[in-house]
Image: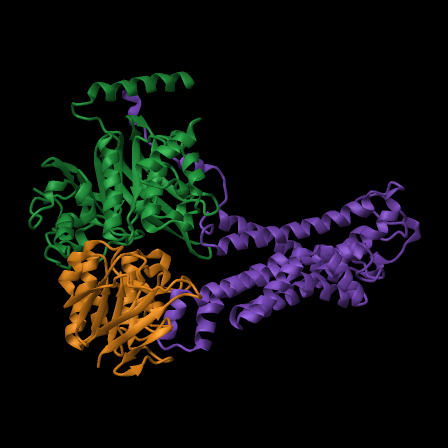
Amino acid sequence: MSYTDTTINQSHISQLPRLNRRQITVLVMAIAAALLLGVVIGGFLLSNEKLMTNFEERSLSPSIEHPFGTDWLGRDMFARSLKGLTVSLGVGMLASTVSVFFALTLGLAAATMGRTVDGAVTWLVDIFLGLPHIVVLILIAFAMGGGTRGVIIAVAITHWPSLARVIRAEVLQLRTSEYVQLSRRLGRSRWWIATRHLLPHLVPQLLVGLVLLFPHAILHEAAITFLGFGLSPHQPAVGVILSESMRHLSTGQWWLALFPGLSLLVMVRAFDALGDNLRLLIDPHTAQE
Amino acid sequence: MPLEARGIGFRYESGQWVLRGVDIKLEPGEIVGLTGPSGLGKTTLARILAGYERPLEGNVELDGNPLPATGYNPVQLVFQHPEKAVNPRWRMCDILTEGWEPNDDLLTSLSIEKGWFSRWPNELSGGELQRFCLARALGPQTRYLIADEITAMLDAITQAQIWHVVLDLVHKRNLGVLVISHDGPLLKRLCNRVTELKSEMG
Amino acid sequence: MSNQTAVSQNTSTTIPEASTGGTMMPLLDVRDLSVSFVQYTGGLQMRFLTVITSLSLTVRPGEILAVVGSSGSGKSLLAHAILGILPNNARISGTMLYVNEDLTPERQMSLRGREIALVPQSVNFLDPLMRVGFQVRSAAHGSEAAKAQRRVFDRYHLADQVKGLFPFQLSGGMARRVLVATATISDARLVIADEPTPGLHPAVVKETLNHLRELADEDRAVMLITHDIEAALTIADRIAVFYAGTTVEIALVADFTDNGEALRHPYSKALWRALAKNEFVATPGAQPSPDALPPGCLFQPNCKIATPECASVRPKERELRGGMVRCIHAA
């Protein structure tokens, strides 16, 4: 039995360069911030010249001068993608903020204003979650007459339900928690409890909700624009670019759709990952992983 | 000056009666034990006595008046699981001073260390948290303490520390205490009398 | 690799057979186990928590070893370390031997739920959406799982209808029996019960403890982790007194008598004297925080007989009167 006295050492597992949840989140946050800054600053610095048509440089494949190539009117696709992304970002940001506002109002109302309101909100949530997203989006955008305003309202109206549900559940749970009930017995007012006990729990949920809604809003904006119910064709939104390039794909100009599509995908993926990691961090069960 | 509950009946929604026709009376300076099998509504009775729940039948009176609906409640309840009774996003010093500012004497007698003040609840053990919960409930306006299995999950030394503080306040302030517990020797050691909650429902 | 394990298993299985009746070899032998965590306190600030500090204990077949300590003091982490289910941010060092063989993470995984079983604190450890019978059966790992499930249900007086219930439908006593049944269906040789009687009615506590005693009497090794020293004393053979993440003393049950003079460590004595049925003495002070353990003896800041030496050197464990103690003053 000479081999029995070996020591258990699990540290070889941790010696691998495996990042923990916080480090991953910081990394993802840095990537998302860099992308965001890059697009905003790039879009701002962009000269209109690049967006102009230039018939001497029509339909060029990607090169150093035109990394994303040029289209059938000789417009630089990199510049167009950048501009498109800034439009998408703006629309996405507005839509997700409005959406979070809806979610907060309806979630709070459901949790605090009695059974009838709760029933009504829950019913609405179920309806919206049950209907296919894109159909509702198109209907609302169409009803609002298309354009930027229509897209923002349509995206905002369709994206609040899951967050509203989270907020409703959180507030209901907090309201019946021992420490909130006890706070009343210690003589604290309802307002004091709302700001001191409830708010610190809701703010992280709202922030994560915002970050998670953002990529969805961008994606759905692009989708309905692509289908022709969204932003006007005169705006260089990513959805417009993709929709236009469809007509030229058969001529072998693959770069027209690939690069704008990819840049949209990278952006969406980065914010999605950021939101997911933040969500796991505010959950005590997974915070220390 | 007593805390008195008469003919208490309670049930959730339209389910079975959890309590029916329960009478209980606490005098100042008196320590009363409450025992009985699990699931017979001891915790519900504790919540009713401390004004957390309104009974469907009967009433709770303090000095002949109903319990105040707002303001500091002279009847304070301490729960079995301290980790659920503190806001996990608050530091310990904020939790401690939510109702009043406990003085150093009380903190010393409960062995609460100043170093714990800046900590979050998940960084302290159950016994340490329960000391904070007790201190929080023992404000100068507290006249009755309802202790619902408050030391059931603690080691013997922490139990003894906590109960000695309570006993001391019973003498000094004429505090009335209801001790809910399964622990026979503990009830025998602490209480003037012990009531058993029996299942006389329906 | 497979050859080697086959050989070592052969040697290890012959020994207990040969030694039954004589002095029993420990089934589980934990030496100098330490567990620490790296934890974030806010932002990217980290702190280092030592929750178990050079802990040693053994559990032999046929006996109940009770590990007694206050709640939230890291006792459960001892169980998790043995089962190999500590969270990712845990660091572990020391030796754990099961049947005289190193308990590696791979071995823990294959033994867990088969040879080493856990009786958890509450039904929250069961799948809330799965019927009880199915869960008990799935712990059996065999072709005759249904039969085995009926057998353990019979043994623990669980009616046949119980298998169709969901965990939330179980009453307190029934839930305990289901948890014990789940742990024993696989014929585990080591049963770890982690706080199996949290705040239960004395009758249910007694029943659950009796079930553990029966398991030990069938020559299984039982490790009972609890805060309730009185409950432990009714069924255990030996008591490991757990303080600030280590075992300060391992005593025989018979040592807990009179005013505790037979006990070895000042903390065990204080614990015994603090019981309501004894002197109800409240020793002042609290356990040290896991991120700021004292360099010397862990009990020294609260100890009445401490000397300067206690504050500087951590006492080694030593044998004393058929038990173990970590105190330089113990005699």
Where is residue B53? Give x, y as percent: 37, 71
Q: Nearer the viewer, residue B18 or A131?
A: B18
Please provide percent x and percent y for residue C328. Answer: 12, 43
Report the label total: 0
| Quadrant assignment, res A63 | top right
Q: Is any atom of residue A169 visible in this view? A: yes
Which quadrant is the N terminus of chain A positioned in? top left
Q: Nearer the viewer, residue B128 or B3?
A: B3
Task: Give the chain coloured green.
Answer: C
Q: Residue furthest toward the front?
A: B202
Q: Residue at x 18, y 77 (%)?
A: B173
Find residue A51 and report its horizontal and vertical position in percent. 84, 57
Q: Which chain is orange?
A: B
Q: Is residue A207 left or right of residue C86?
A: right
Res. A76 in view: no
| Relative to A242, A26 lies left or right | left
Which sits in the foreground, A59 or B140? B140
Tell me where residue C279 sits by quadrant: bottom left
Q: What colour do you see for chain A?
A: purple
